[in-house]
Amino acid sequence: MIPDIDGRNEHAPLRLASEFIVVGSGPAGATAALRLARRGARVLILEEGEAPPDPAEPSALRAMSALYRELGTSVAFGNLPMPYLQGRALGGTSVINGAISWRLPKRVAEEWYAVDPALEEVLSYEAITRVTEEIEKELSIAPTRPDVAHKKNLRMAKGAERLGIGHRPIARNVSGCIGSGRCLQGCPHGAKLSMDRSYLPEAQKLGARVVSGAKVARILHDSRGAYGVRGMLLSGERFEARAAHGVILAASAIGTPLLLLESGLRAGPVGEYFSAHPGLSMTALFDEPIEPQRGATQGHEVYGFLEERIKLEVLGFDLGLILSRLPGHGRTLAENLRRLDHYAIYGAALRAHAKGRVRSRGGRAEVRYSLEPRDLASARRAVRRLGELFFAAGAREVYPGIPGFRSVLRSEEELSAIEREIPLDAKRFTMSMTHLFGTARIGSDAEKSVVSPRFEHHRVPRLFVVDSSVFPDNIGVNPQLPIMALAALAAEGIAG
Ligand SMILES: Cc1cc2nc3c(=O)[nH]c(=O)nc-3n(C[C@H](O)[C@H](O)[C@H](O)COP(=O)(O)OP(=O)(O)OC[C@H]3O[C@@H](n4cnc5c(N)ncnc54)[C@H](O)[C@@H]3O)c2cc1C
C-alpha cells in the first residue's frame, strides 16, 4: 500500500489535523480507523513503521529487518529471558503473522464478565459475535484448503486423528493463497489479507489519511482531555497532529503503555498485568520428505488440549531457519543438511497464568515476565504432547530442544521420561511470545483498570485505547480476530 505521507521523505516539520488520530496501524488501529471512516469521521493514522516491501523481500533475514520491531530481538526478562516478537510496518504485526483467525472463546468472555459485570453491557458476547462475523466475511476467513495444506499440515491432521484429539484445518484471513509458506516474512503473493492489503486501503478510500514512518512520542492532553500527539518522522523531522474528537491508541500491548507512561499518564495499572501466550516449538525428522517450506505456513491446529491451556499448531519456516534449529555439528550437521526437507516443526502456545510488567526505561520498553511453576508444568506437558503428536504423525526422531535432556527421542517410551527427568526450571525451556495482552486494562474500577468499559481513559477524556492492552487477561487462542472485534466495538462507541 502507499501511505498518504511517507515520514522518510518529509524534510520539514509537519503539522496535521483531523477529527480522530489513530496511533498504530495493526489489526486494532486499522479496524478502529476503518469503522470510524465508514461512519463519516475524518481519521489520521500514524504508524512508526513503513509500507511492507512490494514485491516482498525474498531473504528471511532482510524481511525480518524490514518488518519486525528490533529485528525480532526484543526480550522480556524474568526467570527465563524470553524474546517477544512484534511487527513494525503499515499493517502492524498482521503483515508478519500466520493469518490464524480464532473467535474469542465464549468462556473467556464469561471469565471477564465474572470479574467485572460492567463489561458485559458494552462487550456482550452477542455484540462480539456480530462484529466477528462481519470481519470474517470482509477478510475471507476460512479453513485452510487441503490443496494448499501440503505435507507438514496434513501430517499433523493424521497424527491428531490417530491420537483421537480435536484438530482442524486453521481458519485464516487469506484470499488466493498458494501455500508458499512465507506468512511470517510478509506474503510474497499478497494473498494474506493483512491490514495493509485490506482495512487500511479501504479506510484511505473513505478519506482516512495514513502517515508511515511517524513515531508518536507524546500524547498531548490538558484538563479538558487529549487533543493531539507529537513525535518524530523517519527523516528526523518533528511532527505534531491535532485531533478535534479523540486520540485512539492502538500501538500494541507494549507500545501503548509505553506511550501512556512517556506522556506522564501513570495513574492506574499502566503497564501492569502484562500477560501472554509463551510459545515453544519442536522439530522432528520423518523418513520421507516433508518439504516444510511448502504449504500454508500454519495450516493445521490441535485444539483438543485447550482445557490444559495448551494449543498446538504447525509452524512453517524458511529452510535456513529450520537448519538453525537442528542439533549437531560437523558430520552430523552435514547429514542434517542433506535431509533438510525431511523435518517438520510444530509449536505449542500456552495460556500462561504469569503476569508481568511493561515499564519505560529511557523511552524504551522494559518488559519483566516470569513464568509460574504451573506454567512450567504446562510447558513440560506441551513438550510431551508435541512429541506424542509427532510420533503419531509418523516421525522417526523428535528433538525436544531442552538443555540437559536427551537431544534425540526415538520412541514414545523415551518421551515419557520428560516428566521424570525435566525439573520445573524455567531455564530449561526455550520460549518466545507473539500474543501480548493486558497492560492498559479495560474495567469499571479506575484503580484496577486504565480505560473504562467504553475504552476511554479513566482520567483523560477523549483518549481511547483499543488494542490488546485492554484485554483483562490472555485468551488461550490466537488473538488478532478478537482484537479486531473489540476494536470494532470500541469504534462504534467512540463514533457514538
Ligand atoms: C510472528 C507472529 C505471528 C503471529 N501469528 C498470529 C496468527 O497467526 N494469528 C493471530 O491471531 N495472531 C498472531 N500473532 C499476533 C497478532 O499478530 C497480534 O496479536 C496483533 O497483530 C496485535 O494487533 P495490534 O493492532 O494490537 O498491534 P500490532 O499489530 O503490533 O500493531 C501495532 C502497530 O503500532 C505501531 N506503533 C507502536 N508504537 C508506535 C508509536 N509510538 N507511534 C506510531 N506507531 C507505533 C507499531 O509499529 C505497529 O505497527 C502473531 C504475532 C507474531 C509476532
Image (cartoon, rainbow, N blue to C red):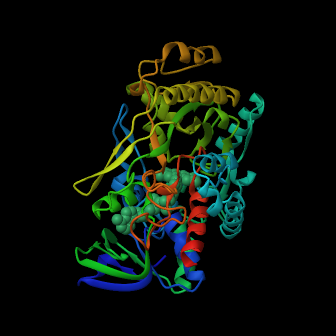
> Is any atom of residue 3 visible in this view?
no
What is the total number of numbered labels drawn onto the structure image?
Answer: 0
Q: Is residue 420 left or right of residue 11?
A: right
**Residue drawn 56% across and 20% down?**
409
Residue 50 in the image: above or below residue 321: below
Q: Quadrant of residue 65?
A: bottom left
Name above or below for residue 404 compared with residue 167. Answer: above
> Is 94 left, or right, of 413 in this rendering?
left
Question: Residue 182, image x and y in percent?
Answer: 54, 55
At which x and y percent is residue 21?
A: 42, 77
Q: Where residue 458 appears, x then y in whole percent?
A: 43, 63
- Residue at horizontal 52 percent and vertical 53 percent from the top: 471
Q: Position of residue 97 (x, y in %)?
A: 53, 55
Determine whether, in the image, residue 275 is placed left or right of residue 358: right
72 w.r.t. 241: above or below: above
Q: Residue at x 69, y 40 (%)?
A: 303
| Quadrant holding the C terminus | bottom right
- Please say whether residue 452 is visible from this viewpoint: yes
Residue nearer the viewer, 367 or 56 = 367
> 13 or 352, which lies in front?
352
Image quadrant assignment for residue 141: bottom right
- Taking depth in this image into account, of 339 and 149 the one nearest to the observer is 149
- Residue appearing at x 68%, y 47% in the figure: 150
Answer above or below: position of 446 versus 375.
below
Residue 212 image-quadrant placement:
bottom left
> Is 139 placed left or right of 459 in the picture?
right
